[in-house]
Image (cartoon, grey):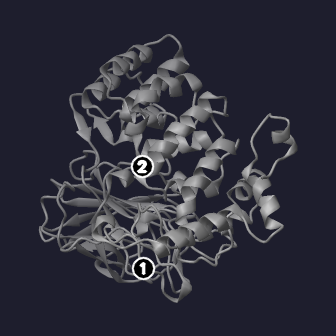
């Protein structure tokens, strides 16, 4: 039995760190004991059909990953140093950098520990940590929902509603599982969670309660200007066409901050009707193994295995990435650079006037000499004309070659990743997408079609990329290129944004 001064006086329980401190004097730890117990149970359990084959012997003295959700399992690397969750959180709270490599190791070698790491971070970190933010995207949906409840409880108990790890968790949950927050919106409003941040209103994506919606409508007309703006931003996040129409009718004359603009949620209003500016379907690009260099934190030996890079490819949805395209740039006269070629256009993208589609730009001029380049396409999808005038003078003169060529594939995006954000992804996530809503870095940038003058719709985006050969391509300082489309005119447009 172990006691401390705290428990001897009857004021608390023995902490995990105290137990570890005592056990390590004998060369062991709580985590080592737990893992040895799990390993023993996995080795001695009887494999039968009732257990669905979940227990299996380990060969060569090393554990092998078995199916998730099992009561006991072998570990991929039982020789890994014991994971001291409390110690990692203490170091992250002190803003030390060394834990990042350790957390990356846990992600790759001991993902079973991630729920405990997330729980401890939400409970104890008064300032959010990039390392714990990264863990949020790696736990399964059930853990995320449970941790959202924990985070709300931590905030209700007095955690910093703007800077704590619990507040950061709410921002990520509002992207990945907003419906979990539907029953707590009044509390989040009263606590001012993430107040002043551009993502403050995101939890209201789940505001389906008519009474709550009407309350927001009333607040939008409040004499309190700050409350009215906040209510309008929350109302827009519902993306409910009826509510968006009321928001459009209530808009004050003149330009609005982008978070209060319909285009922030991929809608527009032409004075008579609402227009959706993004397709309903969302697909991610899947690159071939070994083509890209996985993202690592500085000093970490292992990458962050974010699931958006590992989505399964779907048959019959190939695409070509990189290389050269037919046609010349209207600025420099050089040959165009291919972004994507879609031999088959997936359903739900709002492209019906072409059988296939070639998407290209000029890497030399886009953003450096011409802010937006437009392309007219034939019925076969090939580019027949490029349109653009020099309107930018950055002083940079680039002569890049084409992006490395590869055969890629498209995969339907799981609901958890329908909404992504450039800043919150922080280089970890795959933001190379076709369809869905764009992840704008600056204000929403939907150009007008040069033929019909109607606002173009979002079609695809490509992130800055690090290639396995050590080269990289950055849009500006490391931003995203966006591809827009006007289906009646068969016009595409390319532009990029960065910080």
Please tell me whether residue 386 is drawn above or below residue 78 in the rendered image.
above
The image shows a total of numbered marks equal to 2
Please tell me whether residue 400 is drawn above or below residue 67 in the rendered image.
below
Point out residue 317 in the picture as x, y percentages from the top left corner.
21, 72
Say what secondary structure mark 1 lies in: loop
Which circle marks residue 54 in the picture?
A: none
Left or right position of 153 against 446: right
Which residue is at 54% across, 54% downward?
115
Say what secondary structure mark 2 lies in: helix
Q: Can residue 185 be seen in this view?
A: yes
- Mark 2 vs mark 1: give the one in front: 2
Instruction: Find disc 2 in the rendering and name its residue.
Output: 142
Q: Residue furthest top?
A: 223
Instruction: Find disc 1 in the rendering and name its residue.
Output: 403
Give the alpha-carbon distance from disc 2 to disc 1, as whole Å: 39 Å
Q: In which quarter of the image is residue 140?
A: bottom left
Left or right position of 87 against 173: right
Q: Can residue 427 be seen in this view?
A: no
Which residue is at 66% across, 73% downward?
300
> How many residues crowd around disc 2 within 10 Å: few (fewer than 14), some, or many (20 or more)?
few
In the picture, which quadrant includes the C terminus?
Answer: bottom right
Please tell me whether residue 417 is drawn above or below residue 178 in the rendered image.
below
Give the camera-side residue of 382 and 50: 50
Give the camera-side residue of 82 and 217: 82
């Amino acid at each position: 039995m172990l006691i401390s001064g705290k428990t001897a006086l009857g004021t608390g329980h023995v902490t995990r760190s105290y137990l570890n401190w005592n056990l390590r004097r004998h060369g062991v730890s709580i985590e080592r004991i737990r893992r040895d117990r799990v390993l023993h149970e996995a080795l001695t359990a009887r494999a039968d059909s009732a257990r669905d084959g979940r227990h299996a012997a380990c060969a060569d003295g090393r554990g092998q990953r078995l199916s998730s959700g099992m009561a006991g399992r072998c570990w991929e690397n039982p020789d890994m140093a014991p994971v001291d969750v409390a110690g990692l959180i203490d170091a992250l709270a002190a803003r030390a950098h060394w834990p990042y490599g350790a957390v990356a190791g846990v992600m790759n070698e001991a993902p079973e520990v991630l729920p405990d790491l997330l729980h401890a971070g939400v409970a104890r970190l008064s300032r959010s940590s990039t390392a714990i933010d990264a863990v949020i995207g790696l736990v399964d949906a059930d853990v995320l929902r449970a941790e959202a409840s924990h985070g709300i409880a931590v905030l209700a108990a007095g955690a910093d509603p703007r800077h704590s790890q619990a507040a950061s968790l709410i921002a990520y949950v509002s992207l990945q599982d907003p419906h979990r927050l539907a029953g707590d919106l009044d509390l989040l409003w009263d606590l001012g969670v993430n107040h002043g941040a551009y993502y403050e209103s995101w939890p209201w994506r789940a505001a389906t309660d008519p009474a709550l919606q009407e309350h927001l409508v009333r607040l939008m007309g409040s004499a309190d200007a700050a409350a009215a703006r906040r209510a309008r931003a929350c109302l827009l996040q519902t993306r409910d066409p009826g509510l968006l129409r009321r928001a459009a009718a209530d808009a004050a004359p003149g330009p609005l901050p982008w978070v209060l603009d319909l285009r922030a949620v991929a809608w527009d209003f032409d004075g008579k009707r609402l227009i959706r500016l993004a397709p309903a379907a969302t697909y991610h690009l899947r690159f071939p193994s070994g083509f890209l260099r996985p993202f690592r934190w500085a000093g970490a030996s292992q990458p962050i295995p974010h699931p958006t890079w590992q989505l399964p490819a779907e048959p019959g949805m190939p695409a070509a990435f990189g290389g050269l395209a037919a046609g010349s740039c209207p600025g420099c006269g050089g040959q165009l650079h291919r972004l994507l070629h879609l031999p088959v256009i997936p359903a739900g993208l709002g492209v019906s006037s072409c059988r296939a589609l070639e998407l290209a730009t000029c890497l030399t001029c886009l953003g450096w000499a011409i802010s937006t380049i437009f392309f007219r396409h034939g019925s076969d999808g090939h580019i027949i004309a490029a349109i653009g005038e020099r309107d930018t003078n950055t002083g940079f003169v680039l002569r890049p070659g084409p992006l490395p060529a590869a055969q890629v594939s498209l995969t339907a995006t799981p609901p958890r990743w329908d909404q992504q954000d450039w800043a919150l992804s922080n280089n970890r996530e795959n933001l190379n997408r076709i369809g869905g809503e764009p992840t704008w870095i600056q204000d929403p940038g939907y150009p007008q079609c040069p033929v019909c003058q109607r606002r173009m719709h979002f079609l695809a985006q490509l992130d800055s990329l690090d290639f396995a050969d050590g080269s990289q391509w950055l849009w500006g300082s490391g931003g995203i290129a966006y591809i827009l489309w006007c289906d009646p005119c068969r016009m595409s447009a390319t532009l990029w944004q960065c910080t």
